[in-house]
Every structure is written in C-alpha cells, then in structure tokens.
Amino acid sequence: MRKKIIATTSLAGCFGCHMSFLDIDERILDLVELVEFDKSPIDDIKKFTRECDIGLIEGGVCNSENVEVLKEFRKHCKVLVSFGECAIMGGLPALRNTVPIRECFEEAYLHGPSVEEANEEMILPNDEELPMILDKVYPCHEVVKIDYFLPGCPPRADLIWNTLYALVTGEEVKIPYEVIKYD
Amino acid sequence: MNNEYITITIDDQEIKARPGEFIVAAARRNGIYIPTLCNMPGVHPAGSCRICTVYVNGRPMTSCTTPVAEGMEIETRSPDLEDFRRSVVELLFVEGNHFCPACEKSGNCELQALGYRLEMMAPRYPYQFPERDIDASWPKLIKDHNRCVLCKRCIRTILDEEGHHIFAFRYRGHNLQITIDPEYGKNLTDELAEKAAKNCPVGSLLYRGKHGFETPIGQRKYDKEPIGSDVEKLKKAKVS
C-alpha cells in the first residue's frame, strides 16, 4: 500500500500545536511507517511537490499570505483538518477582533511603551513585500471548507495521534472523553 | 400513599414523580440527566437557555419549566434533540467572546462542559466577535461581559440581607447585559461575591478574593468526567 502523504502548516499560530504533535513520543516511529511528509515545517519543504492525502492546519487566518497558503492546502489536500483553537476560532490572535485595525497598528508601532522611542519617524509597516493584514482574524473554516476539527490549546497528542491513525488506516478509533478539550 | 406520587414515562421507563415538580428535577432524582445551563436545582427556573428541551407527548418543551403531569410521555434523547442542544451551545459560543484557553473558569465551566458532552468540535455558525467590555469597578468582583450567557443565575440567586436583587439586566436585544445595582451593589459582601462567582456557569463573574488557575489541568471539575455523570451514577447505583 502506498504511504499516505501529509502536509502541515502554521498560519496565525504559535507552533504549539506542532509541538503537541511531536508529543506523540515513540509513536512517531509508527507514524513514519504509515506516512510521508510533504510541505511541512517538520521536514522544511516549502512548496507542495505532489498531491497530499491529509493537510493539518494550525492557526487562524490573519493576513493575505495565510489566505493564500490555506487555499493552496485546500487545492492540494484531499482532507483538511483544523487543529487547535486558533484554527477553529481564531484563538489568542483573535483578541484583536474587537479593536479597529488602525488602533491595533498604532498601539503596536507608535504608542506602545516599548516602541515609542524606537520608532521616531512614526512609520507603520507598509512595504509591498509584507502580506496585507486582514480586518479580523478568521477561523479557517470561514475561509475554505474544512473536513475535521481537533479542538484544544494545544490539541492533546492522543487526539492528534488517534485522528491521524483513523484517517490513515481507515479504522474506526474511539476517542476518550479526556482528550477533547478547548484549552 | 398512592396519590402522593404520579407516574410519568421518561425514555420508555416508568418513573414516579412528585406532583408539581419540574420534569428536569424528576428525571434527575431517577438518575436521568437532561442537559441544562441556566437551570439550578432549588432555584426558580428561568427557561432562558432552551438546552433542556425534551419532547413532552411529542411536543418540544423546556423540561426545567414544565411541571410533571400524570401519564406524561417524555423523550429526552434522540439524534435531533442532541443536535438541537448542540446548536444552542454553538450559538452561545459564537455570540460571545469565549476564549477558553485564557479563561479562569476553563475546566469548571458549564458551557464548555456541555460542549464536551455534546461533542461540539467547531460551531456551524460564524463567529460574531462582539465588542464587549469588562467592568472591574466593583471591589469584590470582576464582571466580564465577553463571557456572559445571560442565564440570569446571578439575578435570581444573589440578594442582599433585605431581599433586594443586586444584579439586574440592562439594555435590550443584542445589547442586553448584566449590571450591578449602584445602590444595592454596596451590599455585595465577600460571601455574596464568592457565591455569585460560584453560581455563574461561565467565567463572567470572578471573585477577587480567589486566585484564578489554582486547580491544575487534569484535576478540574469536567476534566475527567462529562457534566451529568453524577446524576447518571445515581441510576447505576440504583440498578446494582
């Protein structure tokens, strides 16, 4: 049987979900038998080299680059999984959603206590190389179709392992109550 | 003796209920858990959250406000009821700003516990991210409107010594919020503030006399067992 191909990414996230993924401990050896990684920070492949079976998305959508990457994932992956609270509901970055974007920028670059003196020319970053920031941080499923959701901050390693195992082998897996948490 | 009890049927099981008691309480005494959020045992029901909806003789009714009647046939669980309840929980999640990872009540929160029990993985509705404030002007507690689900528990249960309600609603529609009476709020003792925080199903009322995050993850109320397990154990104990 051909090994399943997995791609992962972190959009507006902290990489905590990827750390939790690594927390599957020695089962990572079993995983290597079952899957190959394509575009992912785990093997540092930057661009999709082939079509993938499973895409894991960490983090919400906060800028134009996130939108682009997420759409690429949807295009190249048969199954997309949102893992972590940020991917599901915006998480910590979404705390800015109730503050107008200009106020956020002014606080971050002009008036914040740590930047007041450093930014004498009062510049707001606007280089065209930089991705455009969105008005709000959006959950991934409000941008593209997402097939499965793994809540948690971070999702427990057992939840990630069980889900991946079920998706890869097609076997039904019983997920215990304790591993589904929103924090 | 016989006329002290009436017979009702819950999920094809005949049970004895006391006349005048609400369906949710009768079920609870018999080890049948009906999910509730705004309801509190011993407190007059408000019927504001609708999560306890069951079919009574085939019609949807809130079981916390419907008194039992002889011969009632009640259905508490079916795929469509579960889905209905999940949709209510989802609506509450998207309507406020519920950042579980940053909340002091996480793990002990009834809204979250219902999400776990009803297996909500992500809400089907779009997040609203409403602009709401935090009122930290009172000496005994902090009131975070982002997390409030408007269950009225604080309004119903927190009264000063003379029987004045300390909490009340203000504004209307989607602006509705809990407020503290500027006059009677002065009667909010440490004891009352702690009770208010305890009765709040979510992390909207925080008592200043206590530290947040004191219980480690894994030992909190709903970490190991779903909400309602205590009620369901009652039934298992009776059977065995």
Image: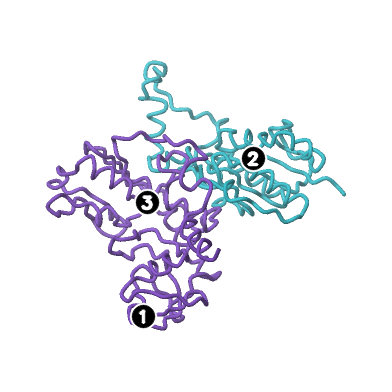
**Circle 1 crowding by C-alpha within 10 Å: few under 14, some 14–19, many from 20:** some
User: SS of the residue at dot 1?
Assistant: loop
Q: Nearer the viewer, residue B237 or B97?
A: B237
Q: Nearer the viewer, residue A127 or A5?
A: A5
User: SS of the residue at dot 2?
Assistant: helix
Name the residue carrying label 1.
B69
Name the residue carrying label 3.
B201
Q: Is residue A145 above or below residue B103?
A: below
Discs 2 and 1 carry the same chain letter: no
Task: Identify residue type, mark 3.
Answer: Pro
Q: Pointer 2 indicates a residue of which chain? A: A
Q: Is residue A46 above or below residue B56?
A: above
Q: Is residue B139 left or right of residue B17?
A: left
Name the residue carrying label 2.
A157
Shown in cyan, the chain is A
Question: CA–CA distance between discs 1 and 3?
Answer: 30 Å
Instruction: Classify residue B174 by image quadrant.
Output: bottom left
